[in-house]
Amino acid sequence: MMDILRDLTEQLVSKTDIPDFKAGDNVTVYYKIKEGAKERIQPFKGDVIQVRGGETNPNRTFTVRKISGGIGVERIFPIYSPNIEKIVVNKYGKVRRARLFYLRGLTGKKARIKERRFIKK
């Protein structure tokens, strides 16, 4: 029984098309939605406010927050979910925390995250 679980977790964790991102980054998650017999891909674009679980943890999740119609919407995605088509990192944010729950109380310009600049050598 344990061998079956270990094999399944190795198959899930071996998914290599996941980009490197952390809290503060702006991402677009393309998620498969099944409605009856139909299937479509819905993009969800927002800021990552937390990443839970270790690098090899099969239960690793991340929370994405966006403002839709003036209302904050958060969604938790399992990283190794078969329903995630792809994850695209739009901007790398410069933050000093691993959990950005303080953004829930901010709106407008105060809720902006500075962009991290990379120095080319």
Image (cartoon, rainbow, N blue to C red):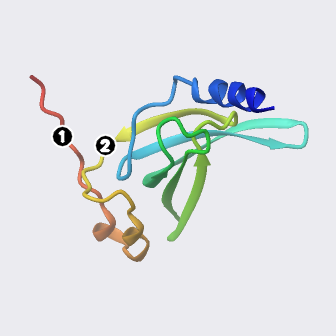
Relative to residue 53, is residue 11 depicted above or below? above
Residue 69 appears anywhere in the view: no
Residue 39 appears anywhere in the view: yes
Kindly give the residue lying farthest to the front in the view shown: 2
Query: At x 40% / y 34%, what residue is drawn?
Result: 20
Mark 2 highlights which residue?
92
Horizontal side of residue 68 vs 119, given as left or right: right
Relative to residue 114, is residue 42 depicted above or below? above
Give the residue type at disc 1.
Answer: Arg
CA distance separating discs 1 and 2 = 8 Å
Query: At x 50% / y 42%, what residue is drawn?
Result: 28
In the rendered image, the quadrant that contains the C terminus is: top left
Count of numbered labels shown in the rendering: 2
Query: At x 40% / y 77%, what residue is drawn?
Result: 105
Which sits in the foreground, 34 or 18?
18
Q: Secondary structure at mark 1?
A: loop
Relative to residue 25, is residue 107 depicted above or below? below
Q: Secondary structure at mark 2?
A: loop
Crowding around mark 2 (Cα neighbors within 10 Å: few <14, some 14 to 19, many 20+) is many
Which sits in the foreground, 46 or 9?
9
Q: Earlier in the sequence, mark 1 or mark 2?
A: 2
Residue 108 x/y as whole percent: 34, 69
The answer to whether mark 1 and mark 2 are in CB contact below 8 A is no
Residue 60 x/y as whole percent: 56, 45
Mark 1 highlights which residue?
117
In the rendered image, the quadrant that contains the N terminus is: top right
Give the residue type at disc 2.
Answer: Tyr
Horizontal side of residue 76 vs 93, given as left or right: right
Relative to residue 18, is residue 113 depicted above or below? below
